Image: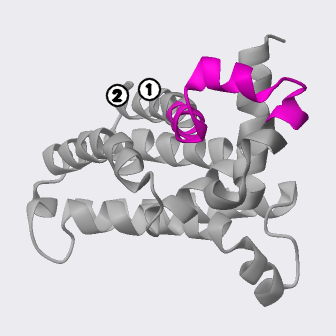
Amino acid sequence: MKARERILRAADRVFGEMGFDAATVRKIADLSKTNKALIHYHFGSKEGLFGSVLDHYFEELSEKLQGALVGDGPLSDRLTRMSDRYLQFLEKNRNFVHLIHREINGGKQMERVIAHMIPLFRLALQGIREAYPKTRAGDLSAEHLLISGYGMIITYFTCSGIVKKLIGTDPLSPKSLQSRKKHLVRMFETIIRTLDS
């Protein structure tokens, strides 16, 4: 594995566990078995490295979600596929949840995160409005539907410690995640039936 990739992996782990402010370039250098000079050579600064970690995540996420949403089939199937891919991504990239949660709550890279999220949000918004005209305004507006869907998915991960205490089992175990996926499919089917009526 090349040094740049080792640095990104180490940075992902350190930023995910400690947050941006508590993380140090020295800790990342030690974990990646490189040195601070090499990190500065590749990324310019701790901020540049953190931005690269975020960009890497969002490039992968955007590819997966856009591929699901723009694919063939009815919008309901594509939204279900998108939800499933998002859950798979979060399951595989646990640090992403911690990084994003900190940033969207006032972190230094909040604007970068928003800039990555806007194109995906607009794409989904357009698809929902075109397929279901009644979502253009009112109680079932596409904006509210998307925010609700996002909340149902991301909150399960960001609040997994609380969820574990509430339900008494590990919400991130394979069995619990499979159950969550099935629940979300049913929730989205219910919403789609309401929009079709």
Please state which of residues 15 and 41 is positioned toward the viewer in this rendering: 41
Residue farthest to the bottom, as pictured: 166
Rendered image: mark on residue 67:
1
Split into 4 quadrants, where in the image is the N terminus?
Answer: top right
Please state which of residues 41 and 180 is positioned toward the viewer in this rendering: 41
Split into 4 quadrants, where in the image is the C terminus?
Answer: bottom left
Residue 191 part of the magenta segment: no
Q: Is residue 101 above or below residue 27?
A: below
Q: Residues within 10 Å of mark 2 (few under 14, many from 20)?
A: some
Residue farthest to the front, as pictured: 37
Residue stretch in magenta: 29-55
How far across and how far down the image is residue 184, in percent?
56, 62
At 38% across and 34% down in the image, what residue appears? 69
For disc 2, the marked residue is 70
User: Disc 2 and disc 1: Cα gap in Å?
Assistant: 5 Å
How far across and how far down the image is residue 57, in percent?
57, 36
Please state which of residues 145 and 74 is positioned toward the viewer in this rendering: 145
Disc 2 residue type?
Answer: Val
At 50% across and 33% down in the image, what residue appears? 55
Q: Is residue 16 above or below residue 154?
A: above
Query: For numbered disc 2, what is the local secondary structure?
Result: helix
In the rendered view, does 65 fall on the left or right side of 177? left
The answer to whether the residue labelled 2 contacts the one labelled 1, judged by CB atoms less than 8 Å apart, is yes
Disc 1 residue type?
Answer: Gly
Res 140 → quadrant = bottom left
Residue 39 part of the magenta segment: yes
At 77% across and 89% down in the image, what residue appears? 166
Residue farthest to the top, as pictured: 2
How far across and how far down the image is residue 193, in percent?
34, 63
Q: Is residue 9 above or below residue 189?
A: above
